[in-house]
């Protein structure tokens, strides 16, 4: 199928922040994808890549979208080298289908997503990561090779298919988190990890009065010899609004020993979850930040956690905004906010002006909020370098229709 026959008119179902694209293309081969992007560059068509469509609302509101390039037909598992613990997969395959395919060899790509339709390409393009980030990092840390479709029509490969390959410029790390602003992702090679034999999760709940005790317990666990697979802190209004969840996943004996060591360091009452109860807790942690009216991503230094939790818990009193927070104990998290648009604007500005909070990005928001704040935040020193790279990879400036960080 060539690029012309693979193209159809855009519909309301294809809209991005209310903007309906003129056309949608679904190339079936990497070559067709590269040809489509090259044609869009020649014709100066504002172009957006789409995987599962689960995060199309992220980013700035586009003025216009001429073309959406879908990876829906590029959805094959290219190669699973189970002996090397690596896999190569096309961008349109969903994370769920990939991990289901890997399960036969007791391996998985250690990334969680709150969205059932998340594709591999979307995962890398947004650098989305869940609780397993604590041990395994983000998709950027797991990519060892990538194939990109460039605006000049070339297909470029970077990296390799083995973990120790370090040849060439690491384009995989560059495009991870770039939101499709440099090139189209065709396929990705990841390093994998074995599925652990067992896992258990230690959970502790704290009242408002015991918030300081929770942060002390978290600090003690972070400084201990316990090696969590995941370690989250959370805040949600209620009788015991503060919580931490620490997951250990390894052999049965080592898991029991590590959970016991962790439990001895905690001042509050704890419970240990396994099986469906454990899975349900982590599913809640994934889903919680995506309720409400807006979702904000923020970072902090681990020592600043007490100040960050105090800031989050005080938002209702200071700004009349309800907040639910879930974050990695090591210093990054998501904040779900509910309130009037003016109040949400005030909260974003408050977070960005706080000395205790790092980079603040508005991921999901109504258009009214996007109209009052830049979702990516104020300019940074690194922006000049990113703009130079954008000019090099996308000289016509067509990719992502102005929605991304550059």
Image (cartoon, rainbow, N blue to C red):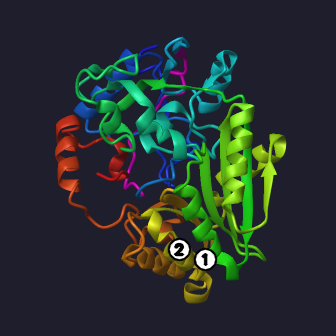
Which stretch is magenta? 61-77
Residue 126 is a magenta residue: no
| Residue 296 percent location from the top left of the image | 51, 63
What is the CA distance from the residue labelled 2 to the residue labelled 1?
A: 7 Å
Residues under numbered marks 2 and 1 in contact, where contact means CB atoms less than 8 Å apart: yes
Q: Residues within 10 Å of mark 2 (few under 14, many from 20)?
A: some
Q: Residue at x 64, y 64 (%)?
A: 234
Residue under label 1 = 212
Q: Residue at x 39, y 73 (%)?
A: 352
Q: Is residue 169 left or right of residue 133?
A: left
Residue 68 is a magenta residue: yes
Q: Is residue 267 above or below residue 345?
A: above
Q: Is residue 393 above or below residue 313?
A: above
Towards the viewer: 151 or 112: 112
Towards the viewer: 183 or 160: 160
Q: Is residue 318 above or below residue 127?
A: below
Residue under label 2 = 306
Q: Residue at x 70, y 68 (%)?
A: 267
Q: Is residue 339 left or right of residue 344?
A: right
Q: Earlier in the sequence, mark 2 or mark 1?
A: 1
Q: Residue at x 45, y 22 (%)?
A: 27
């Amino acid at each position: 199928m060539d690029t012309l026959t693979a193209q159809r008119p855009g519909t309301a179902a294809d809209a991005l922040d209310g903007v309906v694209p003129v056309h949608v293309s679904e190339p079936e081969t990497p070559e067709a994808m590269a040809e489509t992007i090259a044609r869009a560059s020649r014709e100066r068509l504002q172009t957006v890549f789409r995987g599962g469509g689960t995060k199309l609302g992220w980013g700035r509101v586009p003025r216009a979208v001429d073309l959406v390039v879908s990876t829906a037909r590029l959805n094959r598992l290219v190669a699973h080298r189970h002996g090397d613990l690596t896999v190569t997969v096309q961008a349109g395959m969903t994370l769920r289908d990939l991990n289901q395919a890997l399960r036969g060899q007791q391996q998985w790509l250690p990334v969680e997503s709150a969205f059932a339709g998340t594709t591999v390409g979307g995962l890398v393009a947004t650098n989305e990561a869940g609780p397993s980030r604590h041990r395994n990092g983000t998709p950027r840390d797991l990519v060892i090779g990538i194939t990109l479709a460039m605006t000049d029509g070339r297909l470029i490969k970077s990296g390799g298919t083995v973990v120790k390959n370090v040849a060439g410029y690491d384009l995989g790390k560059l495009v991870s988190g770039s939101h499709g602003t440099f090139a189209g992702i065709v396929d990705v090679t990841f390093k994998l990890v074995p599925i652990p034999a067992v896992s258990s999760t230690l959970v502790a709940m704290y009242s408002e009065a015991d918030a300081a005790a929770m942060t002390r317990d978290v600090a003690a666990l972070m400084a201990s010899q316990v090696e969590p697979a995941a370690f989250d802190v959370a805040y949600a209004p209620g009788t015991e609004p503060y919580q931490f969840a620490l997951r250990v996943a390894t052999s049965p004996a080592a898991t029991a020993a590590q959970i016991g060591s962790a439990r001895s360091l905690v001042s509050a009452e704890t419970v240990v979850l396994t099986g469906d109860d454990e899975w349900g807790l982590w599913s809640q942690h994934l889903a919680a930040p995506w309720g409400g009216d807006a979702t904000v991503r923020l970072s902090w230094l681990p020592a600043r956690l007490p100040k960050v939790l105090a800031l989050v818990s005080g938002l209702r009193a200071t700004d009349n905004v309800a907040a639910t927070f879930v974050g990695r104990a090591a210093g990054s998290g998501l904040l779900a906010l509910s309130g009037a648009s003016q109040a949400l604007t005030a909260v974003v500005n408050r977070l960005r002006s706080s000395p205790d909070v790092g980079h603040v990005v508005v991921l999901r928001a109504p258009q009214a909020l996007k109209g009052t704040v830049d979702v990516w935040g104020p300019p940074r020193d690194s922006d000049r370098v990113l703009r130079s790279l954008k000019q090099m990879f996308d000289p016509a400036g067509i990719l992502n229709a102005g929605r991304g960080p550059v």
